[in-house]
Image (spheres, grey):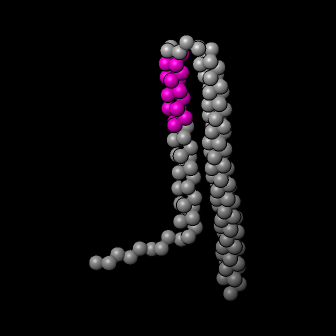
Amino acid sequence: MATSTLPIPREVKHFDEISMRQSLLFTESLKDLKNLRSQLYSAAEYFELSYTNDDQKQIVVETLKDYAIKALVNTVDHLGSVSYKVNDILDEKVDEVSGTELRVSCIEQVCSDLLKVCNYLKTLNCVIMFYT
């Protein structure tokens, strides 16, 4: 038995594709942040062992400072990127809601106008019935 499927309008596919891409980008950004966390923990363990086992503690401390600063800058940069992506997604959603509100407002106006026309036609029909 064959089943028939209705074609999905292109607009719906396009919206779903955009939504999926945004979700994937956001998920990848979060994975990158988790990866940064594990890298920082690994680096902390490495520097702890180096500090404990190395006679040149000052060099280890300076290297750790440099690494920590670079890691912090990298993390803040990545957080800024994630924040930008989230803001971009929110802006798009706000625009969608605004567009939907505008369409609903237009439909309300059309319904109101049609109701006025119907009431006018009823009144006109009563007047015609009265004089005929």
Q: Residue at x 62, y 18 (%)?
A: 59
Q: Residue at x 50, y 70 (%)?
A: 8
Q: Position of residue 76 (x, y in %)?
A: 65, 34
Looking at the rendering, in which quadrant would you find the N terminus?
bottom left
Outermost residue toward the front?
55
| As drawn, 80 above or below 2 | above
Q: Is residue 5 above or below residue 74?
A: below
Residue positioned most to the left:
1
Residue segment shown in magenta: 34-51
> In which quadrant of the rendered view does residue 21 lie?
bottom right
Name the one closer to the observer, 120 or 23.
23
Q: 48 and 112: which one is in front? A: 48
Quadrant placement of the C terminus? bottom right
Please say if 66 is above or below 84.
above
For residue 123: magenta? no
Q: Is residue 43 visible?
A: yes
Question: Of residues 4 and 52, which is closer to you in this image?
Answer: 52
Vertical side of 50 occupied by 20: above or below = below
Q: Position of residue 16 (x, y in %)?
A: 53, 60
Q: Residue furthest bottom?
A: 132
Q: Residue at x 57, y 61 (%)?
A: 15
Assign the magenta stretch its main secondary structure. Answer: helix
Q: Position of residue 130 (x, y in %)?
A: 68, 81
Observer-nearest of 21 and 128: 21
Res. 105 in view:
no
Residue 35 is inside the magenta segment: yes
Where is residue 86 shown, x and y percent of the image?
62, 45
Q: Residue at x 53, y 65 (%)?
A: 13
